[in-house]
């Protein structure tokens, strides 16, 4: 977890690598901090949209869905899972 945070800190470029780091951080937090999962996953999705990174959009939507599912918000989880499936 600390190594991913350091990677993010040392990689200020808004590119696909940063999206991947954010989605990895989102996944690492899902068992300990759902709010952090959703924060990092949504941040990854916004950046992926901005740079038109299709794989990143799909992965980040999957992480958002994971966060909502873990929170017990199954409708939002399903919505995001389905959106992730429609992306390349």
Image (cartoon, rainbow, N blue to C red):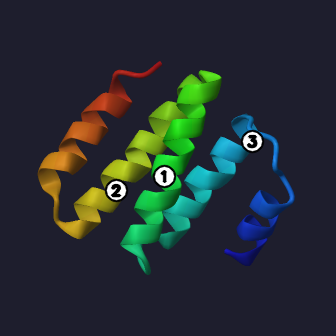
Query: CA gap, disc 2 to disc 3?
Result: 21 Å
Q: Quick one: quadrant of the N terminus?
A: bottom right
The front one of 9 and 67 is 9
Q: Quadrant of residue 87?
A: top left
Q: Which residue is mark 1?
A: 41
The front one of 43 and 53 is 43
User: x and y percent of residue 18 in the render?
Assistant: 72, 46
User: For the view shown, which residue lies furthest in the left direction?
Assistant: 75
Residue at image location 64% in from the left, 43% down from the top: 19
Residue at image location 20% in from the left, 43% down from the top: 78
Query: CA gap, disc 1 to disc 3?
Result: 14 Å
User: x and y percent of residue 60 in the render?
Assistant: 48, 43
Q: Quadrant of residue 83?
A: top left
- Mark 1 vs 3, N-terminal side: 3
- Looking at the image, residue 57 sits to the left or right of residue 78; the answer is right
How many callouts does the rendering have? 3
Query: Considering only vertical position in the picture, is 71 above or below 68?
Result: below
Residue at image location 75% in from the left, 42% down from the top: 17
Badge 3: few (under 14), some or many (20 or more) residues near its Cα, within 10 Å?
some
Residue at image location 65% in from the left, 45% down from the top: 20
Badge 2: few (under 14), some or many (20 or more) residues near its Cα, within 10 Å?
many
Badge 1: few (under 14), some or many (20 or more) residues near its Cα, within 10 Å?
many
User: x and y percent of residue 58 in the render?
Assistant: 46, 33
Q: Which residue is mark 3?
A: 17
- Mark 2 vs 3, N-terminal side: 3
Residue 66: give its label.
2
Query: Considering only vertical position in the picture, is 40 above or below 83?
Result: below
Q: Are marks 2 and 1 in contact (CB under 8 Å)?
A: yes
- Mark 2 vs 1, N-terminal side: 1
Mark 1 secondary-structure assignment: helix
């Amino acid at each position: 977890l600390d190594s991913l945070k350091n990677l993010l800190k040392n990689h200020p470029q808004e590119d696909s690598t940063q999206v991947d780091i954010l989605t990895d951080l989102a996944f690492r937090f899902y068992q300990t901090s759902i709010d952090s999962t959703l924060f990092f996953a949504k941040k990854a999705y916004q950046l992926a949209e901005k740079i038109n990174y299709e794989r990143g959009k799909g992965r980040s939507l999957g992480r958002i869905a994971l966060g909502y599912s873990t929170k017990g918000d199954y409708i939002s989880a399903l919505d995001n899972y389905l959106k992730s499936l429609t992306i390349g």
